[in-house]
Amino acid sequence: MEWETVIGLEIHAQLSTKSKLFSGSSTEYGQQPNTQANVVDLAMPGVLPVLNTEAVRMATLFGLAIDAPIGRGNVFARKNYFYPDLPQGYQISQFDKPIVELGHMDILLENGETKRIGVTRAHLEQDAGKSLHKDYAGMTGIDLNRSGTPLLEIVSEPDMSSAKEAVAYMKKIHALVQYLGINDGNLQEGSFRCDANVSVRPKGQKELGTRAELKNINSFRFVERAINIEVERQIDIIEDGGKVVQETRLYDPDKNETRSMRSKEEANDYRYFPDPDLLPIEITDEFIETVRATMPELPQAKYQRFMAEYALTDYDAGVLTTSRAVADYFEEVAKSTNEAKLSANWVIGELSSHLNADDLEISQSPVSAEMLSSLVSRIADKTISGKIAKEVFQALWAGEGKTADEIIESKGLKQITDSGAIEGMIDEIVASNPAQVEQYRSGKEKVFGFFVGQVMKASQGKANPAQVNELLKDKLKE
Amino acid sequence: MKNRSLTELSAGLKSGEFSSVELTQYFLQRISNYDTDLNAFITVTEEQALSAAKVADEKIAAGSATDLTGIPIAYKDLFCTEGVRTSCASKMLDNFIAPYTATAVEKLTQAGMPMLGKTNMDEFAMGSSNENSFYGAAKNPWDLERVPGGSSGGSAVAVAAKLAPVSLGTDTGGSIRQPASLTGITGIKPTYGRVSRFGMIAYASSLDQGGVFASSAEDCALVLQTMSGFDAKDSTSVERGVPDFSASLNDSLQELKIGLPKEFFDEGLDSNVADVVNEAIEAYKKLGAEIVEISLPNTHLAIPSYYVIAPAEASSNLSRFDGVRYGYRCDEPKDLTDMYMRSRGEGFGSEVKRRIMTGTYALSAGYYDAYYLKAQKIRRLISEDFKQAFENVDVIMGPVAPETAFKIGEKSDDPISMYLSDIYTLSLNLAGLTGMSVPAGFSRENKMPVGLQIIGNYFDEAKILNVAHQYQQVTDWHKKMPSAYAGEK
């Protein structure tokens, strides 16, 4: 039987506000446990939440970017459940009246077609703290630094039909929230994580199959693998005559398997009700227009502009605009060098492969846009060849200098463009290789490469390759 | 000194007739003399009170005193006070010391009022008799075998027996007005949003409001003035100016329109209470007021609606008491579930557990629409009743409670009968309006005090204080004291 997969994603994007959703504590990551939790985050008796309006602005900006109506009287609700790292005994979230209503996001399929994915809603909520189970001699430690951090939960329609589509959608949302400056995009630190609702059904069947919810996946690769493994599991169950149970499952990347966390029967009854400590958020037209006015250039617009303004290919523009950080980096290099195509090649090529190899984000690159600009400029003005440039880049990457000029100088890599010097080397090589000269002159033009190699070797790679070619041709004709 | 108004006490302080330290010592002495019987206080803060009194005396000497500087006060033990235990009369918080102070308390402290201590109450403000206290029942000074009402019983007793000149309570369903009525003192519950709830341990967030107990409307006005106003730390406090409550106290009541809801004078009302209330209405006629019969047709729905909404909110508000970060934790928990179950099972009293269970049920999947949503709809209907009534009248009057103070233990085993004590007070909280209880006389049958309830429109505290004050100018019920406490030991 042919099967069809149905996937919906719930993405939790941590909003990059300075303070928490309902308290003034800092949201900075990686601090000593419980140093960023005040009496509100600790849910002391009698304390009250006060809404951080910056989070409302960020959520509104997201809503506008996905073409969604903004909930004019959206309401905070309490989601009640007991857990040691949930100090209030409830999470303040939004239930039937979210701040962002139905919007959409387009993704590019492998066949080049565009598919529109519905974004059901996005709502504001508090993050919980963390339970630390190691190092406490059988006890559990609670760290409430993350408690109360603002999250935007972005819920998609079940519109995706493969793991690849799910990843494409997740990447688009990931890029968008960074473009909007509302999320730092850091998957490792958990600033951007996702739950996937996965089900299968016989191809052509209308009603949805029973779904499993895969919890808390924090990498693009794991999302793809987790969905694929879950789809296989569900198909196996059905084909063996069994039934998929509705449950929450956890993906284990080490074993590449999903396993059951809890079934629907064990699921909490969250007893949502409007939080009486908070008033509905009244959003005015004026507020929406103020936010709209700050809307930055979005990926699609930037992509079009890169092709028009920098004469980049469709491919280059696409790659360079997948993330705002990459686009900004490229633009800085292109603007300061006036060499758009060359800049694009270096960002997409050498820089990206180094970043990948060392598993770094562009923001962590040891070669800054300014440093790469200095390198691109030296290639453009023929101070160095493309080949030498790779050596210079390597040195910059390794921290051996601050600018390309510094490296070129200290390593003596300046390209030889003095035709007299090049001619001298050529004369010597022609003179000491009479046999090869004879071969060339008798029509064996392949030998030309041998001469080029010899000259470059003699110049330690610094001779300008174009000049070498030209001068060699002249000399060998004689 | 105990028979002086706050204004008179302030004058005495400023003229140097007595110091704040002397005044504070005087009340501490009365607490020491009488509170063993009355059990109005959970914690007496003698040291803090005297050192604050000393500071107050310095302010008075320096001429930087307010009208409240140097006058001691007592706080219901759910107002958080930095460095002093705030127990909510619960085993759960028997060891809890907040690192912050409630905004209302903070404002009065800033004004120079020394804190005498923290008063007894029904656990987590759940109750109408002050019997649900981990620290034992507070007693009615008019008859020690009777309850003082609740939940702010201790604060009412403290003022009724003059262990404090003034105190703060909170009113979620009548918890200021009912004990004020049962102990024969004046109490005001302001409009929801008038006083910050920050630092007030929540029972039902959409209904809770802090207010004042004192010997007169005039005294209430002074203290309420200082504790009112918007607080950035409470999103439900209202950003609007606070008028001078004292300025209009002497306004004439000529042509004042008083509405008497017929639903408040039904067969459930004790005839002795009805007689006292009717007499008070007669006094208002003499003051020039016009009496209009009105109807609040949904009054009978207030109790069922309240006992869904309040427990629903409470079930969530009290989730934070889990034994993890502060408060009571059971001995040697086996695992997490055991810790939750035993900490909460052992830390909460039975009425609290009853309301948590009721509220949890009302919010559960499949019941939410039938209970919580329906209760919210009724709440809107009740607000609408008042809105229409206030189109024709300036204030609404009626009894506070259907009967006078009952005997301790009389209703302990019958929660429904206990809940009925709040029948005339609940609807006002559901609507969010302001209301007072003013001493209006004594039951012929049992000689226990009876209060008159005065209900005002939103933010009309100045109006009801004026209406109460004018009555207190022509009557002296508010000056009566239980004889056992009228002298000095």
Image: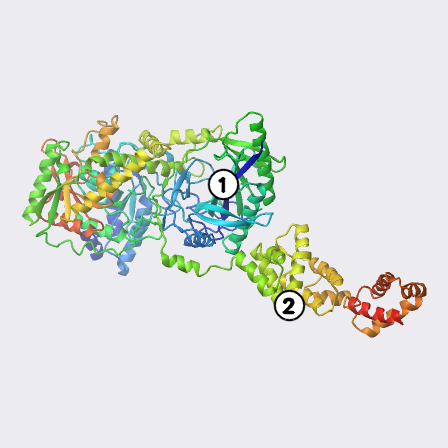
* Residue shown at 57% from the left, 36% from the top: A251
* Residue shown at 9% from the left, 43% from the top: B281
Q: Nearer the viewer, residue B358 or A388?
A: A388
Q: Nearer the viewer, residue A274 or B321?
A: A274
- Mark 1 and mark 2, same subunit? yes
Q: Nearer the viewer, residue A126 or A419?
A: A419
Helix, strand or loop for disc 1: loop
Residue A436 visible in the displayed image: yes
Which residue, given by chain and number where applicable, does mark 2 sit on? Answer: A337
The answer to whether A466 is drawn above or below residue A9 in the figure is: below
Chain for mark 2? A
Which residue, given by chain and number where applicable, does mark 1 sit on? Answer: A158
Chain for mark 1? A
Judged from this view, the residue extending furthest toward the right is: A435
Residue B312 on image: x %, y %: 33, 36
Residue A423 on image: x %, y %: 85, 72
Left or right of B214? Residue B370 is right
Residue B3 visible in the displayed image: no
Q: Nearer the viewer, residue B359 or A327?
A: A327
Q: Mark 1 and 2 residues: CB-CB less than 8 Å, in contact? A: no
Q: Quadrant of residue A165?
A: top right
Picture quarter with the C terminus of chain B: top left
The CA span between labels 1 and 2 is 46 Å
